[in-house]
Amino acid sequence: MVYYKGIMAIDIKEHVAYWREGAKDDLDAAKQLIDGDKTRQGMFFAHLALEKLLKAHVCKNTGKLAPKIHNLVRLSEIARLQLKPQDIEILAEMNEFNIEGRYPVTFVPPPGKNESLEFMKKAKGMFEWLTQKL
């Protein structure tokens, strides 16, 4: 633990590592769920993986703890990431799965396996880019 003027301070590197490791686990879980035809749950975990990587960027780029929010676009803004419009679009699309995973009473059918695999391809590309930037 880091101390500043006798007060326990946060260890940003520890938080970045925490978020990064959790993101890897959640991306693996997303793949397993989709392979098992649990597409709604799989896409929720894909969103969660991106959320955790973005929170790692927030910690790294701001020196502060990540806020307790789930909006990927907003987290990318807080992290001061320079994203292309198509990347912002991917994050916005993935936000829908956060809502679906938490509040599945919207009566929207879960994405089919092929659609989920397409979303996973986009999410994995974004995941790899975010990981590289850490």
Image (tube, rainbow, N blue to C red):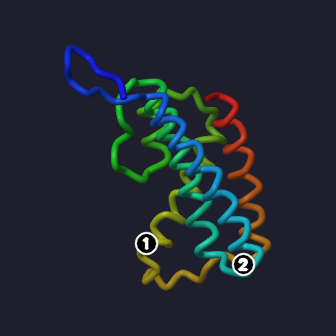
Task: Specify the amino acid type for callout 1.
Answer: Arg
Q: Is residue 51 above or below residue 6?
A: below
- Residue at far top of view: 5
Which residue corresponds to the image point at 66% horizontal and 80% vertical from the top-left? 38
Res 11 label: none
Tell me where residue 131 appears, x and y as whole percent: 66, 36
Q: Amino acid at mark 2?
A: Gly
Q: Element at badge 2?
A: loop
The quadrant of the rendering that contains the N terminus is top left
**Which disc, if any, is residue 112?**
2
Please give the label number shown on residue 102: 1
Residue 125 percent across, percent down from the top left: 74, 45
- Image coordinates of residue 45 in percent, x first then y, are 58, 63
Q: Nearer the viewer, residue 116 or 89?
A: 116
Q: Residue furthest left?
A: 6
Q: Secondary structure at mark 1?
A: helix
